[in-house]
């Protein structure tokens, strides 16, 4: 039975790889370096959008409950000018009674959501890149076992493989998305401040 199960898994993986080959065939024609970069950016973009859109009912409930108790605690701490000890006791009671439990439940649910929407897809695509652009496959395709040589400060050049290049492109996408989001938020805040001043 285990052999049959293993053969089923292997067959499904092969079919999935063939499907991805067909899906990414336009990118493969651009060459390995551009193809890996394109696959990385597409994967990161899809996981980012899917991660924002996909929220379980429990995640939404825990998010709402967490921010509710967080706001209650902030309001309690604002009493410190009138009665510092009372504010401290209220904050501790809220932490012990509700906020800590909700926070850990919310964190764990968020971790499971990220595992499903981001980490698993990224690692699956990393496995696909590792299989499709392995050193042997690159050597048969381009005559060398790496994508390109990276010159360094000391004059040496380091060969860059497909897996490392995939990870770098994914990280670059997330950093770029973060910078763009921060600039947009800053622009919106400055626009809102200008409108209030007027």
Image (cartoon, helix red, strand yellow):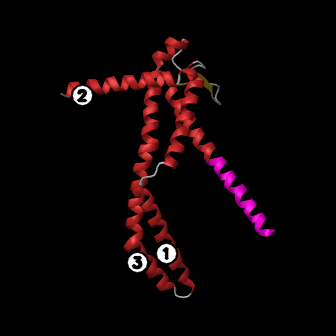
Q: Is residue 88 above or below residue 69?
A: below
Residue 168 showing in the rendered view: no
Q: Is residue 72 above or below residue 188?
A: below
Residue at which label 3 appears: 93
Name the residue furthest front.
Answer: 57
Number of residues whose C-alpha sits closer than 10 Å to that of mark 3, classed few (under 14), some (14–19) or many (20 or more): few
Residue at which label 1 appears: 72
User: Residue at left 52%, top 30%?
Assistant: 164
Q: Position of residue 190 (x, y in %)?
A: 74, 60
Name the residue furthest left.
Answer: 1
| Sequence order check, earlier mark of 2 and 3 | 2
Q: Nearer the viewer, mark 3 or mark 1?
A: 1
User: Residue at left 70%, top 60%?
Assistant: 189
| Sequence order check, earlier mark of 1 and 2 | 2
Based on the picture, tell me whether residue 136 belongs to the magenta stretch. Answer: no
Residue 135 showing in the rendered view: yes
**From which residue to which does the magenta span run?**
178-198
Q: Position of residue 109 (x, y in %)?
A: 40, 54
Number of residues whose C-alpha sits closer than 10 Å to that of mark 2, classed few (under 14), some (14–19) or many (20 or more): few
Between 156 and 171, the residue placed more toward the observer is: 171
Q: Secondary structure at mark 3?
A: helix
| Sequence order check, earlier mark of 3 and 1 | 1
Tally the marks: 3
Between the C-alphas of marks 2 and 3, the distance is 52 Å
Contact between marks 3 and 1 (CB within 8 A): the answer is no
Number of residues whose C-alpha sits closer than 10 Å to that of mark 1, classed few (under 14), some (14–19) or many (20 or more): some
Based on the picture, tell me whether residue 195 belongs to the magenta stretch. Answer: yes
Name the residue furthest bottom.
Answer: 82
Residue at which label 2 appears: 5
Q: Position of residue 153 (x, y in %)?
A: 65, 31
């Amino acid at each position: 039975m285990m052999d049959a199960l293993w053969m089923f898994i292997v067959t499904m993986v092969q079919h999935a790889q063939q499907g991805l080959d067909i899906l990414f065939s336009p990118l493969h024609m651009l060459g390995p370096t551009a193809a890996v970069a394109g696959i990385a950016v597409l994967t990161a973009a899809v996981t980012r959008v899917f991660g924002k859109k996909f929220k379980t009912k429990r995640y939404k409930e825990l998010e709402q409950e967490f921010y509710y108790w967080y706001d209650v605690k902030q309001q309690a701490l604002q009493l410190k000018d009138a009665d510092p000890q009372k504010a401290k006791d209220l904050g501790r009671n809220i932490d012990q009674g509700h906020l800590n439990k909700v926070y850990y439940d919310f964190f764990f649910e968020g971790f499971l959501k990220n595992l499903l929407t981001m980490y698993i897809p990224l690692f699956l695509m990393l496995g696909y890149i590792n299989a499709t652009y392995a050193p042997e496959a690159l050597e048969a395709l381009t005559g060398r076992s790496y994508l390109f040589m990276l010159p360094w400060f000391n004059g040496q050049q380091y060969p860059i493989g497909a897996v490392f290049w995939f990870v770098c492109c994914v990280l670059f996408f997330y950093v770029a998305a973060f910078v763009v989001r921060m600039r947009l938020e800053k622009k919106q805040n400055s626009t809102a401040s200008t409108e209030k001043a007027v």
